[in-house]
Amino acid sequence: MATLNTSNVSVKIYLPEETRAKFKASCAMRSLSMNEVLLEYIETWLEEHEPLLEPKLKRAKTAAKTEETD
């Protein structure tokens, strides 16, 4: 899991107050910060979905190179 450092940025989300309170309490009961849990979920999601993004990025780079040579 990634750790906080000076190159990290913040992300703001909006949750219902009750959801936030439940999430905060659940994290606290496990001695985890909300940030730790969210970061783990985001990293897991990216591992599962990044392969779908990579071909699109490669195609975009190839298209840009093709346009440069035309």
Image (cartoon, rainbow, N blue to C red):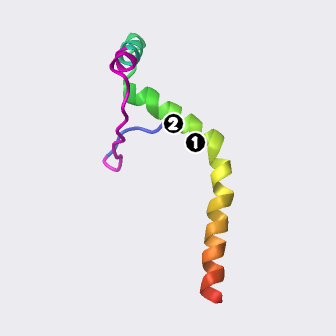
Q: Residue at x 66, y 81 (%)?
A: 66
Q: Residue at x 36, y 32 (%)?
A: 14
Label of residue 42 in the image? 2
Which image quarter: residue 56? bottom right
* Mark 2 Cα shell of 10 Å, populated few (<14), some (14-19), many (≥20): few
Question: Where, quadrant-wise, is the C terminus in this rendering?
Answer: bottom right
- From which residue to which does the magenta span run? 6-21
Which one is nearer the viewer's eye here, 61 or 3? 61
For residue 65, above or below residue 57: below
Q: Residue at x 45, y 30 (%)?
A: 38
Q: How many marks?
A: 2
Q: Single out the residue that lies furthest toward the bottom.
A: 70
Which one is nearer the viewer's eye here, 48 or 18? 18
User: What secondary structure predominates along the stretch shown in magenta?
Assistant: loop
For residue 13, above or below residue 18: below
Residue 57 spot, x, y in % from top left: 62, 62
User: Mark 2: which secondary structure?
Assistant: helix
Q: Single out the residue that lies furthest toward the front.
A: 16
Relative to 2, is 16 on the left or the right? left
Marks 2/1 in contact by CB < 8 Å: the verdict is yes
Which image quarter: residue 25? top left
Residue 68 spot, x, y in % from top left: 60, 85
Label of residue 3 in the image? none
Amino acid type of disc 2? Answer: Ile
Amino acid type of disc 1? Answer: Leu
Relative to 39, is 9 on the left or the right? left
Residue 7 spot, x, y in % from top left: 34, 50
Q: Residue at x 61, y 71 (%)?
A: 61
Which residue bears the numbered disc 1? Answer: 46
